[in-house]
């Protein structure tokens, strides 16, 4: 009897502890927040996503996945229902993606905002609002996998072609040519070093003397430039004096004007008189010339005048004068 009482007490204690554990788990898992439900429809695979998976908004937990099934409006699509906290800032820009939780293989729903408002998604048969579900980076990588593999295959084929026997021979020849070119460059460098040490260095040694000569030449040029500057100032002073009022240029201009007036007066008064005197002298010279010519032709005109000359002996019409009687 006493053993049964101990067993009854132990059973009651176990039942009490189990009830406390259930109450504690209920208390720990209770959620007093209010949620708003949304639907997500996608044609991509959702491997790793389970009911009760977390829903995060920019990394902050705001809800959980309630159920996963098939979309009655699109048989090939998967329908995901999520519960999101009413205080989560879900806007027309919000969209959802599926992200993996590290290396666990489990996935969760990540909510984020786009730069611009997104086109609204029609509600399903349940009447719950739907959020656009974008393909995750892993999904995009999976979609691009065939193209990537094809490009890798093409690159491999090109590498194999590039590394063919003929190309390998060409590559070996090119490497040999590069070696010979390197040897030639080394030889050329040695020659350049010898040239620099034998010819350039002596020329560099004369540079200080050349620099001193150039300095002296520059000093001479500066002195000449100073002299030219002084001459320029003197010329400027002379030009300023010549251009002053009543200066040499003004007096020269006045003399030139007086000479021009005198030339005008000479041309207007003296030259006509000179011309008349010249004409009279010309006429007198012509008359004198005719007179001289007449005297040369008939010298007797000086004695007998300009009348007819008496023929002399031996000339036609000559008559001897009559003799007078002697007394």
Image: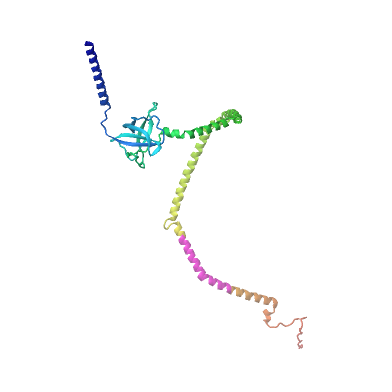
Look at 26% across and 20% down and name the residue there. Answer: 18
How far across and how far down the image is residue 98, in percent? 38, 33
How far across and how far down the image is residue 70, in percent? 38, 35
Q: Nearer the viewer, residue 127 or 197?
A: 127
Q: Nearer the viewer, residue 70 or 314?
A: 70
Look at 46% across and 46% down and name the residue there. Answer: 229
Q: Is residue 290 left or right of residue 50?
A: right
Look at 67% across and 75% down and name the residue there. Answer: 293
Q: Is residue 187 left or right of residue 212?
A: right
Residue 269 is covered by the magenta coloring:
yes
Q: Where does the N terminus fall, quadrant-wise?
A: top left
Q: Nearer the viewer, residue 95 or 239?
A: 95
Prevailing SS of the magenta stretch: helix
How far across and how far down the image is residue 132, in percent? 37, 38
Residue 88 is covered by the magenta coloring:
no
Say if 294 sits above or below 246 in the image: below
**Magenta segment, which residues?**
253-279
């Amino acid at each position: 009897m006493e053993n049964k009482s101990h067993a009854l007490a132990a059973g009651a204690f176990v039942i009490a502890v189990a009830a406390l554990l259930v109450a504690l788990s209920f208390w720990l898992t209770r959620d007093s927040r209010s949620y708003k439900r949304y639907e997500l429809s996608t044609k991509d695979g959702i491997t790793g996503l389970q009911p009760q998976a977390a829903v995060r908004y920019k990394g902050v937990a705001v809800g959980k996945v309630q159920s996963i099934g098939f979309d009655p409006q699109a048989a090939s699509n998967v329908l995901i229902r999520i519960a999101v906290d009413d205080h989560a800032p879900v806007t027309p820009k919000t969209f959802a993606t599926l992200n993996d939780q590290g290396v666990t293989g489990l996935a969760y729903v990540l909510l984020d905002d786009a730069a611009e408002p997104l086109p609204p998604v029609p509600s399903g048969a349940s009447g719950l609002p739907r959020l656009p579900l974008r393909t995750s980076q892993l999904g995009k990588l999976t979609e691009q996998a065939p193209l990537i593999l094809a490009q890798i295959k093409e690159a491999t084929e090109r590498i194999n072609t590039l590394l063919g026997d003929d190309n390998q021979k060409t590559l070996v020849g090119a490497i040999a040519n590069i070696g010979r070119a390197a040897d030639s460059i080394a030889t050329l460098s040695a020659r350049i070093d010898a040239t620099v040490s034998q010819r350039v260095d002596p020329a560099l040694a004369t540079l200080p003397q050349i620099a001193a000569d150039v300095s002296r030449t520059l000093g001479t040029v500066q002195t000449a430039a100073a002299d030219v500057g002084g001459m320029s100032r003197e010329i400027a002073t002379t030009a300023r004096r010549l251009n002053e009022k009543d200066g040499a240029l003004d007096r020269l201009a006045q003399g030139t004007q007086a000479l021009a007036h005198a030339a005008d007066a000479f041309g207007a008064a003296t030259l006509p008189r000179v011309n008349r005197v010249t004409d009279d002298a010309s006429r007198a010279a012509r008359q004198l010339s005719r007179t001289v010519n007449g005297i040369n032709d008939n010298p007797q005109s000086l004695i007998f005048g300009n009348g007819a000359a008496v023929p002399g002996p031996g000339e036609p019409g000559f008559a001897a004068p009559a003799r007078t009687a002697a007394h």
